[in-house]
Image: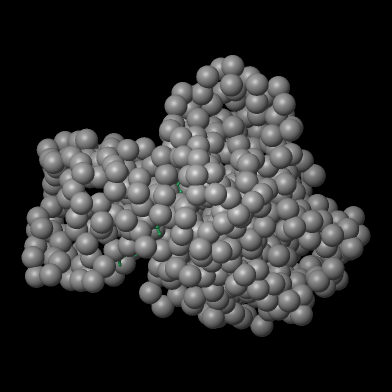
Amino acid sequence: MSGPTDSPHAAHFDAVIVGAGFAGMYMLHRLRGLGFRARVFESGTGVGGTWYWNRYPGARCDVESMEYSYQFSNDLQQQWEWSERYAAQPEILRYANHVADRFDLRRDIDFDTPIASAAFDEQFNCWRITTGTGRAVSATHCIMATGCLSSANTPKFEGLETFRGACYHTGRWPQHDVDFTGLRVGIIGTGSSAVQSIPIIAQQARHLTVFQRTPNYAVPAHNAPLAPEVQQAVKANYGDLRQRARQMRNGIAWPVTQKSALEVTREERRAEYEARWARGGLSFSGSFMDLLLNKEANDTAAEFVRDKIRAIVHDPATANLLTPKSVLSCKRLCVDIGYYETYNRPNVSLVDISALPIEMIVPEGVVVAGKTTPFDVIILATGFDAMTGALNKIDIRGIDGVPLREKWAAGPRTYLGLSSAGFPNLFTITGPGSPSVLTNMLPTIEQHVEWIADCIAHLRANQLHRIEATLPAEDAWVEKVNEIAAGTLFPTCNSWYLGANVPGKPRVFMPYIGFPPYVETCNAVAAGGYTGFALS
Ligand code: NAP
């Protein structure tokens, strides 16, 4: 494929890929393998995406290492050795760098190069893309590998810029080590990032104050070194593990008890929860098949965790504040290493900001209910403008110059989470409307990358220059995504899945629930000659 360029100096590619995280790297590798000319633009100075930016103390994956890894290359999955059950951020970043080197990816990646805008040129059926560094390129296809949790959410706290000490966001952590020894540290937020970093920071800081708006459920990780024989046993049958994972709703191979929590006795239920608690990790939410379908069933699991919190945290008032009242797993379950235990330390205090929010930030510290707590460091563990934030940061314009932000003003609208009507030749890897954040991201990324690569190869083979989701297909898909979510307990809390964490963001459930039926639909669409798309 070739296309026009504005000037002899502007480059044209078959595909421009935005982002060099796990999605962008594999997309580049896959397209190159098919003989396409692709170029990646990445705002960071290195590969790794979320694992490049989220370097906060304690950052670690909540999916087990043997599953949170690529499977497209058997040599890679056989040769790479993971050191722990749940890999920590430095190890995952080493893995990302290993992949970049192993497949010689860096020669087609521009680092320190954010994308500012992408506009569809209808005359030439191509995307005209400009970088934040002022470069202009064009590409037949524009592939957004921008990540689901990559646009940091920094609440507009009055006076934040006046704070005299250091201020860090967990999702934009500095490249250098941050030492909290002897310092008074305040952390805002109690989601996964805070749950992971609080126990580590508490061990260093003179005093750590946690500002909590909503308590979250956390289950123990029971992280441990990964024994070589365990790793070998998985590798001997890696295909089996991957195959089992593909059959699961979330793409992870842990077992889900195919019974209602309400059809077993109280003792059986307790035994199941205890066994899952002892095993550790996200599999707790698979204790019974209806935990996210039936409130009464969910209550039994929620009450089990509440009991655990009350048993771990010594001070009853603190334990009570830490005890969530909402539906378990409605917000992403946190996986912790000593989180609740940390509140038993004399140098840690919890401030409830559910009724009286942070009033303002002053040069000395944080003001709540008229009282200033002084700090040397403030940490914003306030999460992300999830799923749409990174896309909306780029000025993306489709047919007739319509901005994607404008089209998505009432919430994202996509077909399969891969494409949006009015934006031909634009693909979103793990975009809104796909299973993405409700799954193990690595296999989900691979599925999208392979589908997109096959699609582009199909266009080339048939001498087609343009693919665009049709409006009826998109409308039906959006309806389906909503309908499935409405049959669950997911819409009952203010999660980032719904955009409820960002003031003013439309409340729309963004991910598609159910990996296996989703994959089946994508495969059927491709096998049917890309049904729901207009090809020309
Ligand atoms: P998060 O789950 O959205 O948590 C953000 C926290 O900040 C919440 O406690 C939120 O309170 C609070 N907050 C936001 N705005 C606030 C405001 N104006 N005032 C006071 N508090 C405010 O973000 P996250 O912890 O970064 O995690 C996001 C997702 O990233 C996770 O759910 C997970 O999917 C992923 N993640 C995964 C891992 C892992 O693999 N282990 C680790 C970290 C993150 P409310 O709850 O009241 O909104």
Where is 284 relative to 473, above or below? above
**Residue found farthest to the bottom:** 400
Whole-percent x, y for residue 358 in the image: 20, 67
- Where residue 263 sits, quadrant-wise, is bottom right
Whole-percent x, y for residue 354 in the image: 26, 67
- For residue 485, side relative to residue 463 (left or right): left
Where is 353 relative to 256, above or below? below
Task: Name the quadrant where ligand 1 sits.
Answer: bottom left
Residue at 77%, 41% (x, y): give it. 33
Where is 357 relative to 19, above or below? below
Residue at 44%, 31% (x, y): give it. 223
Of residues 385 and 83, which is closer to you in this image? 83
Whole-percent x, y for residue 130 in the image: 55, 63
Where is 422 relative to 319, above or below? below
Whole-percent x, y for residue 334 in the image: 42, 49
- For residue 413, side relative to residue 316 (left or right): right
